[in-house]
Image (cartoon, rainbow, N blue to C red):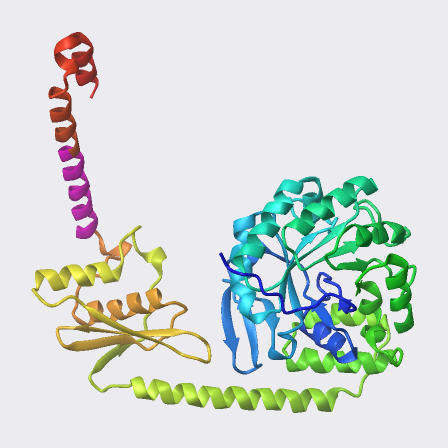
Amino acid sequence: MTVNTPALCFRSKKILAPMVRVGTLPMRLLALDFGADIVYCEELIDIKMVQCKRVVNEVLETVDFVAPNERVVFRTCVRERDCVVFQMGSADAERALAVAKLVEKDVAGIDVNMGCPKEYSTKGGMGAALLSDPDKIECILSTLVKGICKPVTCKIRILPSLEDTISLVKRIEKTGVAAIAVHGRKKEERPQHPVHCEVIKAISEAVSVPVVANGGSHDFIKEYTDIEDFQQATGASSVMIARAAMWNPSIFRREGLCPLKEVMQEYIKYAVRYDNHYTNTKYCLSFYIGNRNFFEMGSFYEETTAILEAKKASLKAKTQDEDEQMEDTDVIKMAVRFDKREYPPQITPKMYLLEWCRKAKHPQPVYETVQRPLDKLFCSVVTVAEQKYRSTLWDKSKKLAEQAAAIVCLRTLGLPEGKLNEGENHLINKRKRENQEFLNNKEHEDDLLLLSSPFLGRHEEWSCKYYTRI
């Protein structure tokens, strides 16, 4: 069992709430600049995250979690490592734990969304759908608390009755969470409905774990001094701000709000610096500026782009040096890739090469594979009969790189590689023969087992019928 050692304190904090499409890296960094103590990322679904690969982006100096389609699902950096909480949508304890372990060393805490009423969250049993399943809530949170070293929190909405709400938060408290964020509305209520400060206050009085009040943007929070008023009205340990921060992140600034033009320019700087997708940048800016346009950012864009391009070029030169180190005049090279669609199921060039080496009484092929730091691609060199072969094309995985190297060897030697268009496939035929021999041997063993059975003499008629059916 892993001992939970929370580093984050959730008392007397001003927190950026998790907001879908808004809580990306530029917004989180901007909120920190203006005075936020803790920032939550947007809700990210566990099924999507478990497919991601952790990649260190040396150009942007970030850690990226990249989906199989090469899309960056979550991006973070050293600047926020000690104050960013990763929020996930999950309805499965083991999957939630897998995601938490994937991101654990790059974030300050893990949060489970248990309050979002939107269909994209609830249809999978996540978000507010969890409020009707306290047992599952307890299972997910307990699994996370026991399984990782970072603090675990959850964000809920209030239930129809105060009694049920208090009962739920007490069960949540027993799981060992570091804090409970409470949006003071029921799941069917929307921002235009008043926030129930009295319910959040009752929750704060019922548990000893820090309670983070959320939902005050519409009724309370218009400027920095209002944050404390909302905290006092709810009796909460801390305050979490969503829409007021979305409209102007300088809501966290003790000295007061900054002009929107200044806020927008700072946001764009982060968006450019960290290569934020333009559609997300446009979406977030729309909350600040409506239909207005602010300029004077052209020179910054050009300067920042030039810096990033120079860094790319430097890393590319380093990669080329590493490629040259791999160059060997004794290596036979071809520009080939392995495409599994061109081969029968379970048949690969590596299998064909191994089979040929056995028949030719050569030692089995030896593969040496390296990965490039810049793009994380792989290249493999295979040695067969003291000759080396490799593809000049780099691949996304070690397995694909090794298959490509095997293809180069087979084609150089004029040997079949198992492709569908090569006609009769002797490896498939061999596998069929082996499978048939296995089935024949299995039937023979079953026959012997049946004939030796003590039931045969006592129930001869039944046994003979059974034997005939076999």
Residue at 71%, 72% in the rendered image: 28
Location of the C terminus by quadrant is top left
Quadrant of residue 85 within the rendered picture? bottom right
Asked if residue 310 lies left or right of residue 155, the reply is: left
Residue 65 pos. (x, y %): 54, 67
Quadrant of residue 331 within the rendered picture? bottom left
Asked if residue 153 lies left or right of residue 34, the reply is: left
Residue at 79%, 68% in the rendered image: 12
- Would residue 124 be visible to someone looking at this image? no
Residue 324, above or below 263: below
Asked if residue 111 lies left or right of residue 261, the reply is: left
- The answer to which of 294 and 60 lies nearer the viewer is 60
Residue at 52%, 81% in the rendered image: 58
Residue 323 pos. (x, y %): 35, 85
Q: Which residues are magenta?
A: 425-441
Whether residue 154 is in magenta: the answer is no
Asked if residue 9 lies left or right of residue 257, the reply is: left
Dominant secondary structure of the magenta stretch? helix
Residue at 55%, 91% in the rendered image: 310
Residue 431 pos. (x, y %): 19, 46
